[in-house]
Image (cartoon, rainbow, N blue to C red):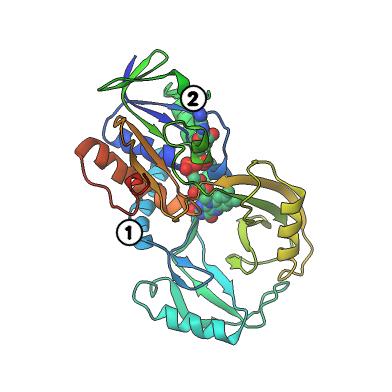
Amino acid sequence: MQVDYLIVGLGLAGLAFSKELEKNNKSFIVFEDHSQNSSIVAGGMYNPVILKRFTPVWNAIEQLEIALPFYAELEKQFNKKYNYPIDIYRVFKSVQEQNNWFIASDKPLLANYMIPQLINNKYEGVLANFGFGKLTNTGRIDTRILLENYRNYLNNKDLIKNESFNYSQLLINKNDVEYKNVKASKIVFCEGFGLVKNPFFNYLPMQEAKGELITIHAPNLNVDFLIKAAVFVLPLGDNYYKVGATFNWKDKTTHPSAEGRQELESKLESFITVPYKIVEQTAGIRPTVKDRRPLVGKHPTHTNLAVLNGLGTRGVMIAPIAAKVLYNNLENDKALDKEISIARFK
Ligand SMILES: Cc1cc2nc3c(=O)[nH]c(=O)nc-3n(C[C@H](O)[C@H](O)[C@H](O)COP(=O)(O)OP(=O)(O)OC[C@H]3O[C@@H](n4cnc5c(N)ncnc54)[C@H](O)[C@@H]3O)c2cc1C
């Protein structure tokens, strides 16, 4: 069997690259072994403002210009809703923070998102003595359902192998690669934190961060926006809310932990006073890089091997543009921006 591409991993990176191939009429086979689940558990938020410092997220506007039409196209393809626009209310901790908000909201890049107005707290069960800053044009992608739908679609077309990719069985020829009974011009690795097991690319400096989330049922919490304080509280509908997320730089497992749950509960209770019940706890590992930029490009010696990884804490916004840029690099020799090219790591 002969295809244009092999793809290893079907998280947001693998999905975005597969879509790019489909759009360009390239054939491919995906390998997926469910060893990682960052994209499935993710909060799925897109937001171009760093909520700690009120500064713009790196390249956010360019990313959103590609990402929003990308998800809209998938909604059309599967006749499903994935994009849920939702405002974000950032709880202010002090007058100083209120002032910083007003200064930041005046900057041209952020003016479309940060509302230059203090929102007073009138919400039952929410502690916010200094009020809120409101962000708009932000939202959530339902990554879990999107990936489920896309995986089923690939399954029906026989384009996915639900098995672990075994690196030792990859044959690298001058102009193509062979894996078991499949020949391909190129292979793109999109394994998220699974990259650490990839003998071709595990020299890249990943600084992965485990994240945990809980889903709560809180019938008395009547908010239809995301609240960001010590953690975020994201409405899912029917009085369910996703609460997250932790950052743990040591634990490399994808299992939910008692410590993670305790941390989330204690942070949640620092600003939410209504009763709630935890109905789910999930965990995943964010494929974060030392310099907080994606990992994109060809292997330094085996040029038919490429990587698409390092999406860190913002896979929803970065994956579509990074996939496009990688495709243009592989097929049209378009140079990669130094900031994202893996050539920055020798
Ligand atoms: C708790 C948490 C909350 C988050 N919230 C947000 C958010 O609100 N907004 C946002 O934009 N981002 C968020 N993120 C980050 C986002 O999830 C990641 O940036 C993104 O999912 C990474 O996608 P990926 O495809 O690179 O990796 P992954 O999602 O990890 O996908 C890699 C895939 O490769 C597969 N794989 C690995 N090795 C192999 C192998 N050898 N053979 C076959 N298959 C293999 C894995 O099973 C997996 O499916 C969050 C992450 C976490 C953990």
Please name the residue shown 47% across and 33% down the image: 9
Q: CA distance from mark 1 to mark 2?
A: 33 Å
Mark 1 or mark 2: name the one nearer the start of the chain.
Answer: 1
Determine which of the numbered discs, if any, sits on residue 62 in the image. Answer: 1
* Amino acid tagged 2: Phe
Whether residue 268 sits left or right of residue 346 in the image: it is: right
Question: Mark 1 touching mark 2, by CB under 8 A?
Answer: no
Task: Say how many tags the image has.
Answer: 2
- Most foreground residue, 250 or 148: 250
Please name the residue shown 54% across and 70% down the image: 52
The residue indicated by pointer 2 is 165
Determine which of the numbered discs, if any, sits on residue 119 in the image. Answer: none
Q: Is residue 235 visible?
A: yes
Provide residue 14's location: percent of width, then percent of height.
Answer: 43, 37
| Callout 2 secondary element | loop
How would you rate the neighbour count of disc 2 (Cα within 10 Å): few for under 14, some for 14-19, many for 20 or more?
Answer: some
Q: Is residue 218 visible?
A: no
| On-image quarter of the C terminus | top left
* Amino acid tagged 1: Glu
The residue lying furthest to the front in this view is 346
| On-image quarter of the N terminus | top left
Say above or below: 330 vs 288.
above
Whether residue 142 sits left or right of residue 211 in the image: it is: left
Say above or below: 240 vs 230.
above
Provide residue 114's location: percent of width, then percent of height.
Answer: 45, 74
| Callout 1 secondary element | helix
Whether residue 98 sits left or right of residue 267 in the image: it is: left
Does mark 1's beta carbon lie closer than 8 Å to ligand 1?
Answer: no
Whether residue 43 sits left or right of residue 322 in the image: it is: right
Please name the residue shown 65% across and 67% down the image: 230
Provide residue 48's location: percent of width, then percent of height.
Answer: 43, 64
Does mark 2's beta carbon lie closer than 8 Å to ligand 1?
Answer: yes
